[in-house]
Image: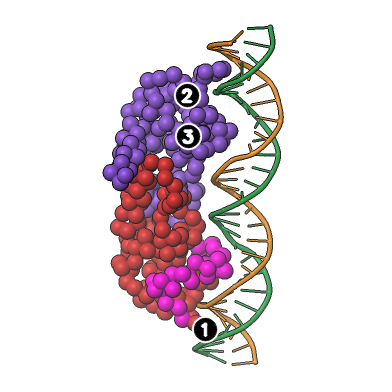
Chain colours: A purple, B red, C green, D orange
Amino acid sequence: MKISTKGRYGLMLLVDLAANECGSPIPLKSIADRQGLSEHYLEQLIAPLRNAGFVKSVRGAYGGYVLAKGKREITAADVILTLEGPIEVVDAQVSDGLEELWDTLRGQILQVLESVTLQDLLDMKQRSEGSYMYYI
Amino acid sequence: MKISTKGRYGLMLLVDLAANECGSPIPLKSIADRQGLSEHYLEQLIAPLRNAGFVKSVRGAYGGYVLAKGKREITAADVILTLEGPIEVVDAQVSDGLEELWDTLRGQILQVLESVTLQDLLDMKQRSEGSYMYYI
DNA sequence: TATAAATCCGAGTAAAAAACTCGGTCAAGG
DNA sequence: CCTTGACCGAGTTTTTTACTCGGATTTATA
Protein backbone atom coordinates (compact mmCIF):
# COMPACT_ATOMS: atom_id res chain seq x y z
CA MET A 1 0.00 0.00 0.00
CA LYS A 2 2.80 2.37 -0.84
CA ILE A 3 3.46 5.12 -3.32
CA SER A 4 6.76 4.27 -5.02
CA THR A 5 9.71 6.62 -5.08
CA LYS A 6 8.82 7.43 -8.68
CA GLY A 7 5.65 9.17 -7.66
CA ARG A 8 7.16 10.70 -4.57
CA TYR A 9 10.31 12.02 -6.22
CA GLY A 10 8.21 13.22 -9.13
CA LEU A 11 6.10 15.26 -6.76
CA MET A 12 9.17 16.62 -5.00
CA LEU A 13 10.54 17.55 -8.40
CA LEU A 14 7.49 19.52 -9.48
CA VAL A 15 7.05 21.15 -6.11
CA ASP A 16 10.64 22.30 -6.39
CA LEU A 17 9.97 23.74 -9.83
CA ALA A 18 6.77 25.33 -8.56
CA ALA A 19 8.71 27.05 -5.80
CA ASN A 20 10.73 28.83 -8.49
CA GLU A 21 7.96 29.35 -10.99
CA CYS A 22 8.68 32.83 -12.25
CA GLY A 23 12.38 32.45 -12.96
CA SER A 24 14.73 30.87 -15.47
CA PRO A 25 14.90 27.14 -16.16
CA ILE A 26 16.18 25.00 -13.30
CA PRO A 27 18.67 22.22 -14.08
CA LEU A 28 18.00 18.81 -12.61
CA LYS A 29 21.41 18.80 -11.00
CA SER A 30 20.49 21.60 -8.65
CA ILE A 31 17.30 19.81 -7.59
CA ALA A 32 19.13 16.51 -7.22
CA ASP A 33 21.74 18.16 -5.02
CA ARG A 34 19.22 20.03 -2.93
CA GLN A 35 17.05 16.97 -2.33
CA GLY A 36 19.89 14.46 -2.17
CA LEU A 37 18.71 12.41 -5.14
CA SER A 38 20.38 10.93 -8.20
CA GLU A 39 20.34 13.25 -11.20
CA HIS A 40 20.23 10.30 -13.59
CA TYR A 41 17.21 8.84 -11.86
CA LEU A 42 15.38 12.15 -11.91
CA GLU A 43 15.93 12.31 -15.66
CA GLN A 44 13.93 9.14 -16.00
CA LEU A 45 11.13 10.57 -13.94
CA ILE A 46 10.83 13.94 -15.59
CA ALA A 47 10.74 12.52 -19.12
CA PRO A 48 7.16 11.21 -18.85
CA LEU A 49 6.13 14.43 -17.11
CA ARG A 50 7.47 16.37 -20.07
CA ASN A 51 5.71 14.08 -22.54
CA ALA A 52 2.49 14.58 -20.61
CA GLY A 53 2.91 18.34 -20.89
CA PHE A 54 3.43 19.25 -17.26
CA VAL A 55 6.95 20.61 -17.70
CA LYS A 56 8.92 22.18 -20.53
CA SER A 57 12.62 21.60 -21.04
CA VAL A 58 15.30 23.97 -22.27
CA ARG A 59 18.33 22.19 -23.67
CA GLY A 60 21.95 23.27 -23.65
CA ALA A 61 23.95 25.38 -21.24
CA TYR A 62 21.86 27.41 -18.80
CA GLY A 63 18.99 25.10 -19.67
CA GLY A 64 16.77 23.14 -17.37
CA TYR A 65 13.08 22.65 -16.69
CA VAL A 66 10.11 24.94 -16.13
CA LEU A 67 6.50 24.19 -15.29
CA ALA A 68 4.36 24.17 -18.42
CA LYS A 69 1.20 24.94 -16.47
CA GLY A 70 0.26 26.99 -13.44
CA LYS A 71 0.92 25.48 -10.03
CA ARG A 72 -2.81 25.51 -9.33
CA GLU A 73 -3.52 23.55 -12.51
CA ILE A 74 -1.36 20.52 -11.71
CA THR A 75 -2.60 18.05 -9.11
CA ALA A 76 -0.84 15.32 -7.18
CA ALA A 77 -2.97 12.86 -9.13
CA ASP A 78 -1.56 14.21 -12.42
CA VAL A 79 1.98 13.50 -11.31
CA ILE A 80 1.40 10.15 -9.67
CA LEU A 81 -0.81 8.76 -12.41
CA THR A 82 1.70 9.85 -15.04
CA LEU A 83 4.59 8.16 -13.28
CA GLU A 84 2.96 5.09 -11.77
CA GLY A 85 0.07 4.44 -14.12
CA PRO A 86 -3.50 4.04 -13.00
CA ILE A 87 -4.25 3.48 -9.33
CA GLU A 88 -5.04 -0.18 -8.93
CA VAL A 89 -5.64 -1.33 -5.40
CA VAL A 90 -5.57 -4.93 -6.62
CA ASP A 91 -4.63 -6.35 -10.02
CA ALA A 92 -7.21 -5.32 -12.57
CA GLN A 93 -8.17 -8.84 -13.60
CA VAL A 94 -8.90 -10.32 -10.18
CA SER A 95 -12.50 -11.27 -9.48
CA ASP A 96 -12.76 -12.12 -5.82
CA GLY A 97 -16.23 -10.74 -5.17
CA LEU A 98 -14.72 -7.84 -3.25
CA GLU A 99 -14.55 -5.45 -6.21
CA GLU A 100 -16.89 -3.03 -4.48
CA LEU A 101 -14.39 -2.56 -1.66
CA TRP A 102 -11.47 -2.10 -4.04
CA ASP A 103 -13.42 0.40 -6.11
CA THR A 104 -14.34 2.43 -3.06
CA LEU A 105 -10.75 2.43 -1.92
CA ARG A 106 -9.46 3.46 -5.33
CA GLY A 107 -12.05 6.20 -5.51
CA GLN A 108 -11.08 7.68 -2.16
CA ILE A 109 -7.38 7.61 -2.95
CA LEU A 110 -7.99 9.31 -6.27
CA GLN A 111 -10.19 11.91 -4.66
CA VAL A 112 -7.48 12.90 -2.19
CA LEU A 113 -4.83 13.09 -4.90
CA GLU A 114 -7.02 15.07 -7.26
CA SER A 115 -7.94 17.59 -4.61
CA VAL A 116 -4.35 18.66 -3.98
CA THR A 117 -2.49 21.03 -6.33
CA LEU A 118 1.20 21.88 -6.48
CA GLN A 119 0.32 25.19 -4.84
CA ASP A 120 -1.25 23.31 -1.92
CA LEU A 121 1.84 21.14 -1.59
CA LEU A 122 4.05 24.20 -1.67
CA ASP A 123 2.00 25.72 1.12
CA MET A 124 2.18 22.50 3.14
CA LYS A 125 5.90 22.31 2.70
CA GLN A 126 6.51 25.89 3.73
CA ARG A 127 4.26 25.43 6.74
CA SER A 128 6.17 22.34 7.83
CA GLU A 129 9.53 24.03 7.28
CA GLY A 130 8.40 27.25 8.91
CA SER A 131 7.29 25.47 12.03
CA TYR A 132 10.88 24.63 12.89
CA MET A 133 11.37 28.32 13.60
CA TYR A 134 9.35 28.12 16.77
CA TYR A 135 11.69 25.55 18.28
CA ILE A 136 14.92 27.51 17.90
CA MET B 1 -0.41 1.44 -4.38
CA LYS B 2 -1.59 -2.14 -4.06
CA ILE B 3 -2.92 -4.40 -1.37
CA SER B 4 -0.76 -7.53 -1.47
CA THR B 5 -2.22 -10.99 -1.92
CA LYS B 6 -1.69 -11.54 1.79
CA GLY B 7 -4.33 -9.02 2.69
CA ARG B 8 -6.60 -9.99 -0.16
CA TYR B 9 -6.44 -13.75 0.40
CA GLY B 10 -6.79 -13.14 4.11
CA LEU B 11 -10.03 -11.28 3.50
CA MET B 12 -11.29 -13.97 1.14
CA LEU B 13 -10.45 -16.52 3.81
CA LEU B 14 -12.43 -14.81 6.55
CA VAL B 15 -15.33 -13.98 4.27
CA ASP B 16 -15.47 -17.66 3.42
CA LEU B 17 -15.53 -18.59 7.10
CA ALA B 18 -18.14 -15.91 7.74
CA ALA B 19 -20.37 -17.43 5.06
CA ASN B 20 -20.43 -20.63 7.12
CA GLU B 21 -20.50 -19.08 10.55
CA CYS B 22 -22.98 -21.30 12.37
CA GLY B 23 -21.54 -24.68 11.38
CA SER B 24 -18.61 -26.96 12.14
CA PRO B 25 -14.98 -26.00 11.60
CA ILE B 26 -13.94 -25.56 7.97
CA PRO B 27 -10.62 -27.07 6.85
CA LEU B 28 -8.30 -24.83 4.86
CA LYS B 29 -8.20 -27.37 2.06
CA SER B 30 -11.83 -26.81 1.21
CA ILE B 31 -11.35 -23.06 1.06
CA ALA B 32 -8.16 -23.42 -0.94
CA ASP B 33 -9.94 -25.66 -3.44
CA ARG B 34 -12.99 -23.45 -3.70
CA GLN B 35 -10.97 -20.28 -4.23
CA GLY B 36 -8.21 -21.87 -6.26
CA LEU B 37 -5.45 -20.99 -3.80
CA SER B 38 -2.53 -22.87 -2.25
CA GLU B 39 -3.41 -24.53 1.05
CA HIS B 40 0.15 -24.15 2.29
CA TYR B 41 0.11 -20.44 1.58
CA LEU B 42 -3.21 -19.96 3.34
CA GLU B 43 -1.74 -21.63 6.42
CA GLN B 44 0.80 -18.84 6.59
CA LEU B 45 -1.91 -16.24 6.35
CA ILE B 46 -4.32 -17.65 8.89
CA ALA B 47 -1.65 -18.10 11.57
CA PRO B 48 -1.37 -14.38 12.38
CA LEU B 49 -5.16 -14.07 12.23
CA ARG B 50 -5.41 -16.81 14.82
CA ASN B 51 -2.78 -15.16 17.01
CA ALA B 52 -4.68 -11.91 16.76
CA GLY B 53 -7.83 -13.68 17.95
CA PHE B 54 -9.99 -13.39 14.84
CA VAL B 55 -10.27 -17.13 14.22
CA LYS B 56 -10.11 -20.26 16.34
CA SER B 57 -8.60 -23.52 15.15
CA VAL B 58 -9.66 -27.09 15.83
CA ARG B 59 -6.90 -29.61 15.30
CA GLY B 60 -7.11 -33.18 14.14
CA ALA B 61 -9.55 -34.96 11.86
CA TYR B 62 -12.77 -33.06 11.21
CA GLY B 63 -10.92 -29.97 12.42
CA GLY B 64 -10.52 -26.64 10.72
CA TYR B 65 -11.15 -23.01 11.47
CA VAL B 66 -14.05 -20.98 12.84
CA LEU B 67 -14.53 -17.26 13.34
CA ALA B 68 -13.71 -16.28 16.91
CA LYS B 69 -15.86 -13.14 16.71
CA GLY B 70 -19.08 -12.12 15.05
CA LYS B 71 -18.95 -11.17 11.39
CA ARG B 72 -20.05 -7.66 12.29
CA GLU B 73 -17.20 -7.28 14.76
CA ILE B 74 -14.35 -7.92 12.32
CA THR B 75 -13.46 -5.20 9.84
CA ALA B 76 -11.42 -5.24 6.65
CA ALA B 77 -8.91 -3.07 8.49
CA ASP B 78 -8.50 -5.75 11.16
CA VAL B 79 -7.54 -8.33 8.59
CA ILE B 80 -5.33 -6.18 6.41
CA LEU B 81 -3.48 -4.53 9.28
CA THR B 82 -2.86 -7.92 10.87
CA LEU B 83 -1.44 -9.39 7.69
CA GLU B 84 0.34 -6.42 6.14
CA GLY B 85 1.26 -4.34 9.14
CA PRO B 86 0.40 -0.67 9.48
CA ILE B 87 -0.73 1.25 6.41
CA GLU B 88 2.20 3.36 5.30
CA VAL B 89 1.72 5.31 2.14
CA VAL B 90 5.42 6.14 2.13
CA ASP B 91 8.25 4.83 4.30
CA ALA B 92 7.77 6.05 7.84
CA GLN B 93 11.11 7.80 8.08
CA VAL B 94 10.93 9.98 4.97
CA SER B 95 10.72 13.72 5.50
CA ASP B 96 9.96 15.31 2.19
CA GLY B 97 7.72 18.11 3.39
CA LEU B 98 4.70 16.31 1.98
CA GLU B 99 3.78 14.46 5.18
CA GLU B 100 0.43 16.21 5.33
CA LEU B 101 -0.57 14.63 2.01
CA TRP B 102 0.60 11.17 3.05
CA ASP B 103 -1.22 11.45 6.36
CA THR B 104 -4.46 12.44 4.68
CA LEU B 105 -4.13 9.57 2.25
CA ARG B 106 -3.41 7.08 5.00
CA GLY B 107 -6.34 8.37 7.00
CA GLN B 108 -8.78 8.00 4.12
CA ILE B 109 -7.63 4.48 3.32
CA LEU B 110 -7.95 3.46 6.95
CA GLN B 111 -11.38 5.01 7.20
CA VAL B 112 -12.67 2.97 4.26
CA LEU B 113 -11.19 -0.25 5.61
CA GLU B 114 -12.48 0.33 9.12
CA SER B 115 -15.99 1.04 7.92
CA VAL B 116 -16.41 -2.35 6.25
CA THR B 117 -17.20 -5.51 8.24
CA LEU B 118 -17.11 -9.14 7.15
CA GLN B 119 -20.90 -9.01 7.04
CA ASP B 120 -20.72 -6.12 4.58
CA LEU B 121 -18.25 -8.01 2.43
CA LEU B 122 -20.46 -11.06 2.49
CA ASP B 123 -23.39 -8.94 1.34
CA MET B 124 -21.26 -7.40 -1.44
CA LYS B 125 -20.13 -10.78 -2.59
CA GLN B 126 -23.60 -12.25 -2.69
CA ARG B 127 -24.87 -9.20 -4.56
CA SER B 128 -22.12 -9.52 -7.16
CA GLU B 129 -22.67 -13.26 -7.53
CA GLY B 130 -26.42 -12.90 -7.57
CA SER B 131 -26.30 -10.40 -10.38
CA TYR B 132 -25.08 -13.07 -12.78
CA MET B 133 -28.54 -14.57 -12.56
CA TYR B 134 -30.00 -11.78 -14.58
CA TYR B 135 -27.75 -12.51 -17.53
CA ILE B 136 -28.59 -16.17 -17.92
C1' DT C 1 34.74 27.79 -32.84
C1' DA C 2 35.84 25.23 -28.81
C1' DT C 3 34.06 24.20 -24.36
C1' DA C 4 31.14 23.27 -20.80
C1' DA C 5 26.59 22.70 -19.07
C1' DA C 6 22.62 20.73 -19.87
C1' DT C 7 18.93 17.64 -21.78
C1' DC C 8 18.06 13.24 -24.02
C1' DC C 9 18.12 8.09 -24.66
C1' DG C 10 18.31 3.08 -24.03
C1' DA C 11 20.11 -0.61 -21.80
C1' DG C 12 21.70 -3.06 -17.88
C1' DT C 13 21.92 -4.38 -12.91
C1' DA C 14 21.58 -4.97 -8.00
C1' DA C 15 18.68 -5.23 -4.15
C1' DA C 16 14.43 -5.94 -2.02
C1' DA C 17 9.90 -7.59 -1.65
C1' DA C 18 6.23 -10.72 -2.89
C1' DA C 19 4.45 -14.99 -3.60
C1' DC C 20 4.71 -19.02 -3.05
C1' DT C 21 6.87 -24.18 -2.17
C1' DC C 22 8.59 -28.01 0.65
C1' DG C 23 9.20 -31.27 4.17
C1' DG C 24 8.06 -32.46 8.03
C1' DT C 25 5.82 -32.75 13.26
C1' DC C 26 1.84 -32.88 16.21
C1' DA C 27 -3.17 -33.74 17.49
C1' DA C 28 -7.55 -36.01 17.35
C1' DG C 29 -11.40 -38.79 15.47
C1' DG C 30 -12.89 -43.26 13.73
C1' DC D 1 -3.01 -47.17 13.87
C1' DC D 2 -4.42 -44.60 10.05
C1' DT D 3 -6.15 -40.57 8.12
C1' DT D 4 -7.23 -35.83 8.27
C1' DG D 5 -5.89 -31.59 9.13
C1' DA D 6 -3.51 -27.95 12.03
C1' DC D 7 1.24 -26.28 13.03
C1' DC D 8 6.06 -24.79 11.96
C1' DG D 9 10.29 -23.00 9.83
C1' DA D 10 13.17 -22.73 6.13
C1' DG D 11 14.05 -22.30 1.22
C1' DT D 12 13.11 -20.80 -3.58
C1' DT D 13 11.37 -18.47 -7.45
C1' DT D 14 9.49 -14.52 -9.52
C1' DT D 15 8.50 -9.83 -9.85
C1' DT D 16 9.15 -5.20 -8.88
C1' DT D 17 11.77 -1.37 -7.50
C1' DA D 18 15.30 1.59 -7.64
C1' DC D 19 18.68 2.66 -9.41
C1' DT D 20 23.43 2.91 -12.49
C1' DC D 21 26.09 3.55 -16.79
C1' DG D 22 27.71 5.20 -21.11
C1' DG D 23 27.04 7.79 -24.31
C1' DA D 24 24.76 11.31 -27.96
C1' DT D 25 22.86 15.84 -28.77
C1' DT D 26 21.91 20.73 -28.00
C1' DT D 27 23.15 25.50 -26.99
C1' DA D 28 24.90 29.67 -24.44
C1' DT D 29 29.10 31.83 -23.73
C1' DA D 30 34.25 32.76 -23.74
> Mark 3 or mark 2, which is nearer to you?
3
Hey, what amino acid is under mark 1? Answer: Gly
Q: Nearer the viewer, residue D27 or B44?
A: D27
At mark 3, the secondary structure is helix
Give the chain of mark 2. Answer: A
Q: Nearer the viewer, residue A72 or B19?
A: A72
Tell me: residue A20, above or below residue C19: above
Q: Position of residue A36 (x, y in %)?
A: 51, 38
Q: Which mark is residue B60?
A: 1
Q: CA distance from mark 3 to mark 2?
A: 12 Å
A102 in the magenta segment: no
Tell me: residue D6, above or below residue A58: below
> Mark 3 or mark 1, which is nearer to you?
3
Give the overall secondary structure of the magenta segment.
helix
Q: Position of residue D19 (x, y in %)?
A: 59, 40
Q: Which residue is mark 3?
A: A34
Is B10 on the left-hand or right-hand side of A59? left
Hey, what amino acid is under mark 2? Answer: Ile
Q: Residue at x 57, y 69 (%)?
A: B40
Q: CA distance from mark 3 to mark 1?
A: 62 Å
Q: Which residue is mark 2?
A: A26
At mark 2, the secondary structure is loop
Q: Residue at x 50, y 22 (%)?
A: A64
Image quadrant in which you'd find residue C4: top right
Give the chain of mark 1. Answer: B
Q: Is residue A132 shown to the viewer in this render? A: yes
Q: Residue at x 35, y 24 (%)?
A: A70
| Span colored in magenta | B33-58
